[in-house]
Amino acid sequence: MVFDVILYVSLTIFVIGLIVKIYSWFSRKIGISAINTTTVERVSTAFKGVLKVIFSVKILTLIKVFIFDVVFQRKILEENFLRWLMHMLIYGGFMLLLLMHALDKIITIHLFSDYNSTLNPFFFLRDFFGAMVIVGICIAVCRRFIVKVSRLKTNAMDTYVLVILAIILVSGFLLEGLKITAYSEFQNMVEEYADTDDVAELGALESFWVQEFAVVSPNLKAPFDKEVIEEGRELHEMSCASCHSSPRSAFVGYALVKVLNPMAIELDRAGMVGLLWYIHILACFIGLAYLPFSKMFHVIATPVSLLANSVMDEGKSDRANIATRQAIEIDACTHCGTCNLYCSAMMASEATGNDYILPSEKMTFLKGMAAGKDLTSKELKAIQEGVYLCTNCDRCTVVCPSGINLRELWINVREGLIQSGVPEPLVLSPLSIVRGLNQENLAVYDYPRPIELARQAVAGKFDFLMDPERPLSFDKMEMGDDGCGLIDNTFSYCFGCQNCTTVCPVVGSYDNPQEVLGLLPNQIMCCLGLGLTEMASGSRMIWDCLTCYQCQEHCPQNVQVTDILYELKNLAVKKLKKL
Amino acid sequence: MKYALFLGCQIPARVKQYDLSARAVMSRLNVELIDIRQFNCCGYPMRNLDKKAFLLSAVRNLALAEKEGLDMLVLCQCCYGSLKKAEHLMKEDGDLQREVRRILSENGLKYEGKVRVRHFLSVLYHDVGIETVKGKITRSYKGLKIATHYGCHALRPSNITEFDDPVAPVLFDNLVEVTGAKSVDWTSKLECCGAPLIGINDDLSMNLTKKKVEDAVKAGADYLCTGCPYCQIQFDTVQKMMVSRNGNGEHLASIIYPQLLGICMGIDEQSLGIDMNQLDISGVQSFLREE
């Protein structure tokens, strides 16, 4: 009764969750592709797309990808054998337990007419599959918490999955171990199956079970007479052996018997068998009910993502379908961290301490965003930097075992973030090449706005120079120098020949360069010589510098002009970050 | 000869034909290229942000190549400049350098300055040798005029990049002329292509490109020739964007050096990714004369 109630409640939550999630695949709006698409349109486009694939040669690709990537997880194997083994043990073991053990009355019993959970090979296999999962969990715990694989980030969801699996498995094995030793369980079986009421005969059977089947009896203790055991064995053969193999086959549970043995009687009397059973099935049902909302949902979303990506072509697929696929991809990420191992920008994350630079953490942010989580302005700045500090090298997409097209996802999300109004200085770095190349596709947005916002944010204010009442001072602090002096002080060698400005192709591109650029290279060097670091770092020139090194190469005084401009840019970024 | 191939970020994503053609040419010249999957960004785009992020990124690559005991062959000039700069900076021993070494050691790496950073063109010219390159040529161009574009970050700052004479370089011209093509003299040969400002100041970036293209056309060039993915993107993808914006303006397609050379070695078009360029370069074949 209780079992049925919990089962149906959790199953209902699971099904509702599944519907909510799948609905979100068609309603969630992420980035550019999702603009101007309706849920109805997305459902119908997806339906047409699926039909088109099924009735074309692409169906062969789907079958191939299903076998190699979904079932055998080739991408993980290519990446790392231990990781593949870990995942196969957990996923394989758990699936087999689910089919053979949890659904035994629905599946196993129909496949094998002689099925009985306490009979070999089922008795043995259940423990074997369980042991597979346990070994897999141990490898996962090792990787995440003991060896601490570099850039493998662990969040609450990763921990939850390991904990819930561990509770299910450990409670299951403890339950099994306790049931083996439990006298009450033995008595129940005797009542139900024994073919005799004779006290002496039952005593012999009990003796046999105490000696051979590890039952801990409050009445009888080893050693036993040989004749008694023989009599017990005969009775066992007659009444029990056809449905109960030796518990030694359930090797994990039997190993636990040794630990439980001294407390077996007390545990049995305290009703621990029932309690463990509750813990075990509750954990299973919590896992089931929470599955659509947890990382475990990847068991559904990841195969869909792998299959969808294998048949969708960039540039050719319908925008509505791309929007839908990207919504699915958010659920398909397992936070496995493969992307982080190969992320080109990984060292920037180490240098700045901003985890959002790593792809897996950006995905975590997207999951949060999709779930409607609010961001603080600090988080927004960090995520904006993280999403922009990407060299667009495509590697995360190439290595992702879930087949997620991360590159398209970043491009899609990036624009929305930098359009939000918070200036991002990285927009003024060569990382913008991809945005520049993609500008024709950004027509729905105000393409120049983020560049202008960033330029305004890093521009110097020069208030102190504008105030005619204020006397010029050579006190650095008063002149706006915040004490962040430049490391490179070669500007002090400058004797004002203006070679740097003469050879600069940027200066040469304008009729009236000073009006556009603020300060010219030679003036910047002069500023620095006067200690006006803030003024120098506020000029537009430093951001329009091509870094072609003509100035530095042609300086007769070996002033490191280009490198100094780099340093001024770093200074301006640092200042903006402090705000 | 064996090198660790450093592709950088642009080539695998946007200039795959450079990867293809460089490998094809190098295999003809019996140069073995080893891929190190753990390589990351060279640090170049991070120089605007933070010196530590730049240096750490660059030095991690150096340390990875050093661990394998290989010199690096770099295809991109911006990567090359960045790695050379890092190599130079690591000769000093300041707080920043110590911090970089500390983070590297946390990642199980160390850098001792043993690895040599080499640009693809330098390897061809100096290590393989121009005569060996010549020896592999089966057919050469006749009457083909090339505007050789050196690229900034290989040439300058010359005391750090050690590529060629920064004012009167000959290395790339000689490599172009090995193929029988003529490397024309043009006014803005050593100027920037404009790529560093694309996405930041598009007008300025495109103006610089426009000026270069005009100069090359004025010098009678049939094609531009590059040895850097950034320059190639600028002359190919960006120039195409410029052409479509301005109607039928003057334009000049750009060929990547290993594509130009590979054709003379008789390597098939597909292995050189000839059709992967945005602006058509297939006409270059019409200048071929069998030897």
Image (cartoon, rainbow, N blue to C red):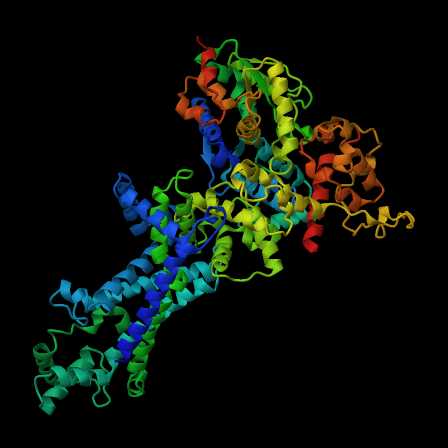
Front-most of residues A114 and A435: A435
Q: Residue at x 60, y 61 (%)?
A: A376
Q: Is residue B243 visible?
A: yes
Q: Is residue A169 visible?
A: no
For the image, the number of numbered tags is 0
Residue A434 place in picture, x, y as percent: 55, 39
Q: Where's residue A174, x and y in %? A: 31, 75
Rendering quarter of residue B84? top right
Up-down: is B123 above or below A91? Answer: above
Q: Pick whichever, A330 or A192, lies toward us.
A: A330
Camera-side residue of B260 and A416: A416
> Which image quarter is the C terminus of chain B in?
top left
Q: Tell me: A66 left or right of B133.
A: left
The relative height of residue A213 versus residue B250 in the rendered view (above or below) is below
Residue B93: x, y in percent?
Answer: 69, 44
Image-quadrant location for residue A507? top right
Task: List x then y, in percent, for residue A131.
Answer: 30, 64
Describe residue A447's horizontal placement relative to residue A54 as left or right: right
Horizontally, residue A157 falls left or right of residue A245, namely right
Residue shown at 58%/26% (left/top)?
B246
Is residue A410 placed above or below A520 in the rendered structure? Answer: below
